Image (spheres, rainbow, N blue to C red):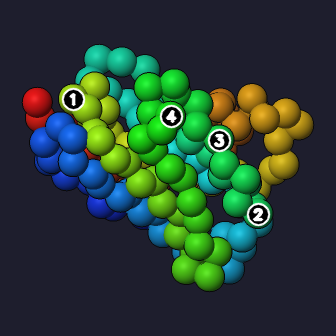
Amino acid sequence: QLQAFGGGLVQAGESLRLSCAASGRTFSTYYMGWFRQAPGKEREPVAAISRSGGAWLWTDSVKGRFTISRDNAKNTVYLQMNNLKPEDTAVYYCAAAFSTPQAVEIMKLSSFYNYWGQGTQVTVSS
């Protein structure tokens, strides 16, 4: 089970840190991902992190502003979001996968993930 939290209403330029806490003892064996879905748009991949902490950001617009990290001792994955922009407004979802991807690009796909959190709303005002 995944529980995402940390969203909120902020002004452009501010920061938020999203957290996704996982229950169970096998968190360290999961690949983790963050996705987001803006109103009227399809869900898009934002970032992913491997079991050992290898990290990828998928969306060019967040590179240099967002960072994904994990703390296996706390069963938690984070998404640090700095210099937020109105276009970052979306519901953010965390996801967990117990398989090993055959290619890095696989981690962009929703179908790769087995478990999903409930989503946390991020709203950035201009």
> Which of the two labelled residues, at mark 1 and mark 3, occupies the earlier sequence position?
3
Q: Is residue 108 above or below residue 5?
A: above
Q: Are marks 3 and 4 in contact (CB under 8 Å)?
A: no
Q: Which residue is mark 3?
A: 56
Q: Is residue 117 above or below residue 88?
A: below
> Which of the two labelled residues, at mark 4 and mark 2, occupies the earlier sequence position?
2
Q: Secondary structure at mark 4?
A: loop
* Res. 113 mark: none
Amino acid type, callout 2: Ser
In depth, the one of 68 and 75 nearer the eye is 68
Residue 85 location, x and y as percent?
25, 32
Q: CA distance from mark 1 to mark 3?
A: 22 Å
Q: Which residue is mark 1?
A: 86
**Closer mark to the observer between disc 3 and disc 4:** 4
Residue 103 location, x and y as percent?
85, 33
Q: Which residue is mark 2?
A: 52
Residue 55 location, x and y as percent?
66, 49
Q: Which residue is mark 4?
A: 63
Quarter of the picture containing the C terminus is top left
Amino acid type, callout 3: Trp
Q: Secondary structure at mark 1?
A: helix
State which quadrant residue 101 falls in. Answer: top right
Amino acid type, callout 1: Pro
